[in-house]
Image (cartoon, helix red, strand yellow):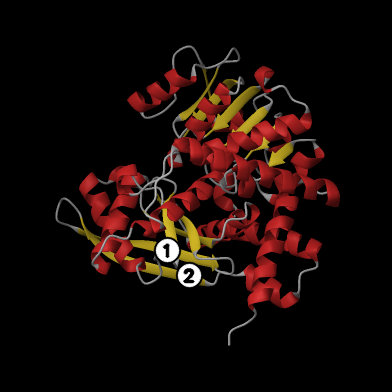
Amino acid sequence: MTTEQIAATINPWAVAQQQFDLAAEHLNLDPGTRQVLREPRRALTVTFPVKMDDGIVRVFTGYRVQHNLGRGPAKGGIRYHQNVSIDEVKALAMWMTWKCAVVGIPFGGGKGGVIVDPKKLSLKELEALTRRFTTEISVLIGPERDIPAPDVNTNAQVMAWMMDTYSMHQGYTVPGVVTGKPISLGGSEGRNEATARGAVYTVVDAAAHLGMDLTKATVAVQGFGNAGSIAARLIRDEGATVIAVSDTGGGILNRGGLDVDRVIGWKKEHGTVAGFPGAKAISNDELLAVECEVLIPAALENQISAANAGRVKAKIVAEAANGPTTPEADAILHDNGVFIIPDILCNAGGVTVSYFEWVQDLNRDHWSEAIVNAKLKEIMDRSFGEVLAMSLLEEVNMRTAAYLVAVQRVADATAMRGLYP
C-alpha cells in the first residue's frame, strides 16, 4: 500500500483522541474535565445548493466544528477537499485548541471544510460555493465567536469572499470575522509566510538544541504548496540545502541540492514539481525515506505511519502539516532517536499571525512586516523553549510535552470558568 492508501485507512479523530488521552493520563486529569475536553463543543453539518456554470444545481456538504471555547473564540481554517470528513474536521478543531494553547494565544479551536475538489470548479462556481457556505455557517462565526482562516485549497481570495458575505448580512464591514485576508481588506503583513516561517524558527531552535550545523544540513520537504514551498525557501536562506521536494504530482531529488526558486517557478508553470530538469523522479513514499538531516512533512494527515516510520532517516521531523504522524509512528521515531517538532508547535506560526491580524482588525491598526516577524519569532522561540523544558523535565518526547503544556492550560481555563449553569 502507498502512503496515501495507508493514510486513508486511519481515522484522524481517533488519532487526535489517542494523543489527548496520553496527555490526560500523564497529567492525571480530573475525569469530568477529561470528558469535556475529549469531545467537540459544537459540530455543524450543512448541505447547500450551488448553481453551476452549466445551469445544473449541485448540492455540497460542509462542516464547522468548535472543539473548545474555554480560552477564547474558536479559531481555525476552512479546507476545500474531496476527502473532507466530519471526523477529519473534528480532529483538526481539537488540534487547533492545543495549538493556540501551546503558543499562549487567547483562542479556542475550530475548523471547517467542504467536500469538493476545487480544481474542478470555475472561479465563479468557487465564489458561489464560498458565499453560500459562509451564509450556512454564519450562525456560528463572528469576530468574537469563531474566526475562520485559509487551509488546504483555500486562500486570501476565498477569505475575502467570506468576509464580504458575512459583512453583507451585518450591513457593515467586519474585517475581523476571518483572517488570512488580502492586505487591502485588513490582512496582516507576513501572514502568507507565517506557517512556514514559524516552522523554520522551530527548526533553527531544534538544531541549536541538538548541536546541528544547519549550513551543513540537507532537507526534504513533502508537500510543495504554500507552507512547503515557503519553508523550503526560508530554510535555504538559513544555509541548509534542500535536496528533495514532492507534491501530489510526484517528487524530485537532487543530492547536490535543488534550486528552490527555480522549482517554485517550475511548479507555477506546470502545476507540479514533477519533471523538474536535473532532478531524479521519486515518489512521496521515497521522499519520506530520503537520507537527510531535516524532513518537513507539509502535506496532509497520517503520512508517517507504523508502515513507513522505520524508514525515516532524518534527524529532525518538523511537522508543518497538521497530524502527519500517527501515534504508532511517534513511538518508532522516538525509539530511533528522531527529534520531532510536533505540529501543534511547529506550524503554529499561521494561527499566531492570524491572531496578530485579528488584533489589528479589531483596533483598525496595521503593523509592518518587521514587527509581525519579530513578534512571531519571540512567541515561537518562547513556546519551543517551554515545550523542550517540559520534555526534559518529564522525560517524554516533544509531542507528549507539547500536549502536556497545552492540555494543562486548557484544563486550567475550563476549571476556573466552571460549569454553566
| Residue 14: quadrant of the picture | bottom right
Q: Bin the neighbour count of mark 1 within 10 Å (Cα to Cα): few under 14, some 14-19, many 20 and up.
A: many
Under tag 1, what secondary structure? Answer: strand
Type of amino acid under label 2: Ala
Type of amino acid under label 1: Tyr
Q: Are marks 1 and 2 in contact (CB under 8 Å)?
A: yes
State the quadrant of the C terminus.
Answer: bottom right
Q: Bin the neighbour count of mark 2 within 10 Å (Cα to Cα): few under 14, some 14-19, many 20 and up.
A: some
| Residue 354 visible in the snapshot | yes
Query: Separation of disc 1 and disc 2 at Cα?
Result: 7 Å
Where 35 sits versus 346, above or below?
below
User: Looking at the image, which is closer to me, 2 or 235?
Assistant: 235
Q: Position of residue 66 (x, y in %)?
A: 50, 66
Instruction: Tell which residue pokes out farthest to the left in this image.
Output: 55
Q: Does 228 sit left or right of 130 as displayed?
A: right
Task: Indicate which disc, 1 or 2, sits on the residue closer to the N terminus.
Answer: 2
Where 286 sits versus 150, above or below?
above
Under tag 2, what secondary structure? Answer: strand
Residue depicted at 74% across the width and 60% down the height: 23
Residue depicted at 71% across the width and 30% down the height: 207
Residue depicted at 63% across the width and 76% down the height: 417
Residue beneath label 2, please? Answer: 43
